[in-house]
Image (spheres, helix red, strand yellow):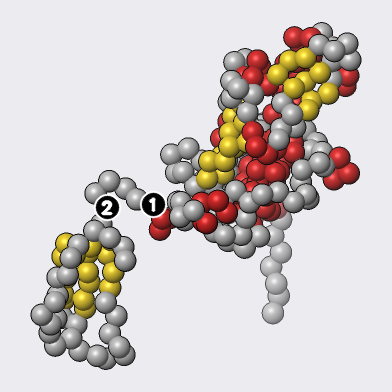
Amino acid sequence: MAVPTLSRREVTAGLGAIVLAFSLHPRSAAPQQPAPLPGSLQRNRMLDAWLRINADGSATVFTGKVELGQGALTALAQIAAEELDLPVSRVAMISGDTARTPDEGHTSGSFTIEHSGTALRLAGAEVRGILLELARQRLGVPVDALVASEGIISAPDGRKVGYGALAAVVDLHREASAKVAPKPARKHGIVGKSAPRLDIPRKVTGGVAYVQDLRLPGMLHGRVVRPPRYGARLDDLGKNASPENVVAVVRDGSFLGVIAEREE
């Protein structure tokens, strides 16, 4: 069988029309994507979502991670204090407050340090750099000549300015760049050292250490009465179905629940 051969002109003539489309600026139509940031900074990119410098020279640190008994908040406070050149005692931790803290998803395993710790380390280093720049402007001394320690920035000639004095003019409502290098490990004076756990005092004194320790006005407690085995059927509740402090007993077939004023 003979195979017909067609020229390019004959092929295009058979199509009837050819539509050509092109763009002089192929990248201009697509929105510019922000550069990726490490850790939880990627989803929470503003510096003031993580840190606040207070008028008394202390710092407030915000984290979406919560304390589950692993000492995470103590470690995060150490990381932030290290980069800010503040004592841990002058760092207040705000944790897991959906109205104020960054959204970091769930808390599990070692991801707290990997994600939130990375974000706080880089944010803290950047905030320290901002404070040093403000001190340079106020003291007229190059940043390289300034020394920050325990919330005080000192010049070689003895002049000083505290974080509290800079709190009124520091603007942290800006996107983190993650370009300010954090301290190298050899210069750490807080991270890697033993520190009192922030969660221990509340645990040993009966304070609010976990979510189940919260006590809200008018709060009630609910519990399910479990059957002794699978397939058990609830016949009756007995004579003492509503002891003291019980607000309601809820029954649905063999399901039994109790609502009371007190948890125990």
The quadrant of the picture occupied by the N terminus is: bottom right
- Is residue 237 in sight in this rendering? yes
State the image coordinates of residue 200 (x, y, percent, origin top left).
57, 54
Q: Secondary structure at mark 2?
A: loop
- Looking at the image, is 60 positioned above or below residue 198? above
* Residue in view at x 14 percent, y 77 percent: 240
Q: Secondary structure at mark 1?
A: loop
State the image coordinates of residue 30 (x, y, percent, origin top left).
60, 37
Nearest to N terminus: mark 1 or mark 2 = 1
Q: Nearer the viewer, residue 134 or 201?
A: 201
- Looking at the image, is 72 positioned above or below residue 157? below
* Residue in view at x 71 percent, y 56 percent: 7
* Residue in view at x 81 percent, y 18 percent: 154
State the image coordinates of residue 132 (x, y, percent, origin top left).
76, 21
Residue type (three-letter) at the residue carrying disc 1: Leu
Left or right: residue 123 versus residue 62 is: right
Q: Residue furthest front?
A: 205
- Looking at the image, is 80 positioned above or below residue 12? above
Return the residue at label 1. 214
Left or right: residue 118 versus residue 232 is: right
Task: Please give the label number shown on residue 219.
Answer: 2
The quarter of the displayed image where residue 52 is located: top right
* Residue in view at x 83 percent, y 23 percent: 147
State the image coordinates of residue 173 (x, y, percent, origin top left).
58, 25
- Is residue 51 in sight in this rendering? no
Question: Dot 2: within a 10 Å radius of its alpha carbon, few (fewer than 14), some, or many (20 or more) residues?
Answer: few
Q: Nearer the viewer, residue 114 or 27?
A: 114
Left or right: residue 241 versus residue 190 is: left
Query: In whole angstroms, how far apart are the C-alphas of marks 1 and 2?
Result: 9 Å
The quadrant of the picture occupied by the C terminus is: bottom left
